[in-house]
Amino acid sequence: MTQFKTVRGMRDLLYEDAETMRYIEQTARQIASLYGYGEIITPIVEPYELLAAKAGEEVRSRMFTFQDLGDRRVALRPEFTASLARVVATRLRNEPRPFRLFAVGSIYRYDEPQRGRYREFWQSDYELMGSSRPEADAEIILLTDSLMKQAGLKNHAFKVGHVGIMRGIFRQEKLNEKVQDEIMQLMDKKQYEDAFKAVENAEASEKCQQVLRDLVATGGKDTSAVIDSIREHVKDYSSAVEAAGNLNEILKLVSEGGAEIDLTVEAGFERGLEYYTGMIFEVNIRGLDIALGGGGRYDRLIELFGGDPTPAVGVAHGIDRMMLGLQEQKVEHGGQTEALVTVIPIGDAMRSQALRVSRILRDANISVETEVLGRRMVKALEDADRRKMHYAVLVGEREMKEKTVVIRDLRRRDQKTVTIDEAIEIINQSRTERS
Ligand code: AMP
């Protein structure tokens, strides 16, 4: 017989893992509501062209793509931003700005599977569309900080850069877009020597090559000192100077906004997606050297999808990686569900009564597992013990005639005959004692 496994890079999430995933999803939803982001649900399958438009070569080459039966070229979404930009360019076109949009769900990329890297993974995504002002960029960073804290993660740190610094230099050097994109991809992968080689091959000036080397070596936590030094390096490239000024404003707003944030500026930091036009960032936690989330400003994507010019900034958080972070840091969370009570019919004749009693308990908001294996009482009780349940409710013929049940306290190992209402009271009483 064939033993089926999950497709490579895709996982089943069992019990605790599923609960942790839903807990993070719930936390993400809570943050969305605290910051006024409305949830949007979009299809997992989208037109290939939409997703490929500005995703960048790295993501484009890793898409799950296929022809559907109507011969359309479609793909599984490798991110949310394109779908949300489509929504703004079409359905929300005539609505007042800004838009604060939230999405959460599964994402698909043909990445090489390893710890924290899967082919199906989950993201929570926040997009603030319609503002080009630095306070919008600051809000996205602060929101990410809130999410990490609210989820219970400790020691998270931000790495921030600005696409406009390098792009400004390349544009002034008249490098074409394709070459620029290639260089940015190499920088994103930290293949700096290859990036410098590509700059040289593109016949950029000697000065440009030197400035790039200087920039890659420029970074640190003293943000205003780093910005000053970036400004000094790029002083001959006017739009790069402007970009550094914009980054400075954003970072000032973040720090004056009151949050204690661990933040490093890196002038040579790039991200793989081609649509970025401004500030970019990643969030990491110590001990887990992979990014938990990343985002940035993309001012031209919505226009590209046929919408009105709409500056925008957003972030996506990797829920699977946040799960790893919680495990690594041994963070307890309150999301766990527990069935405290088992209801056992004494003999087959009592099966329907056991279902009825279970339903009454559930109507009182008590989690109940009903015995469905037809086991004798002793066996069913042994199993309930093993699974650390707190109560067994025994449904016998004699008790039913008297409209009672036997409630057995599995920890104290005593039992008494009570009405169903009394049983509910006893169970609720023990729940309040424990909480
Ligand atoms: P990106 O859309 O590439 O900026 O990714 C945003 C976040 O999604 C990253 O910071 C990761 O936390 C997460 N992520 C990206 N790719 C994967 C993957 N293959 N497996 C798990 N999480 C991922």
Image: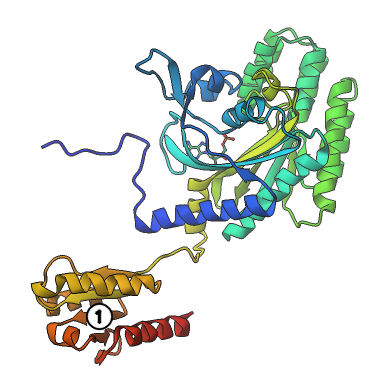
User: For the residue carrying disc 1, how many other residues have a C-alpha within 10 Å: few (<14), some (14-19), or many (20+)?
Assistant: many
Question: From the viewer's perspective, is 23 left or right of 425?
Answer: right
Secondary structure type for disc 1:
strand
In the figure, 342 relative to 23: above or below?
A: below
Residue 254 position in % (x across, y down): 80, 48
The amino acid type of the residue labelled 1 equals Val
The quarter of the picture where residue 151 lies is bottom right
Residue depicted at 26% across the width and 75% down the height: 357
Residue depicted at 76% across the width and 39% down the height: 219
* Image quadrant containing the N terminus: top left
Q: In this orientation, does residue 100 appear?
A: yes
The quarter of the picture where residue 429 lies is bottom left
Q: From the viewer's side, name the closer residue of 123 and 44.
A: 44
Residue bearing the label numbered 1: 393
Say whether mark 1 is within 8 Å of ligand 1: no
Residue 24 position in % (x across, y down): 52, 54
Q: From the viewer's side, name the closer residue of 384 and 367.
A: 367
Question: From the viewer's perspective, is 47 left or right of 391?
Answer: right
Q: In this orientation, does residue 226 appear?
A: no
The quarter of the picture where residue 291 lies is top right
Residue depicted at 9% across the width and 74% down the height: 349
Question: From the viewer's perspective, is 386 left or right of 254?
Answer: left
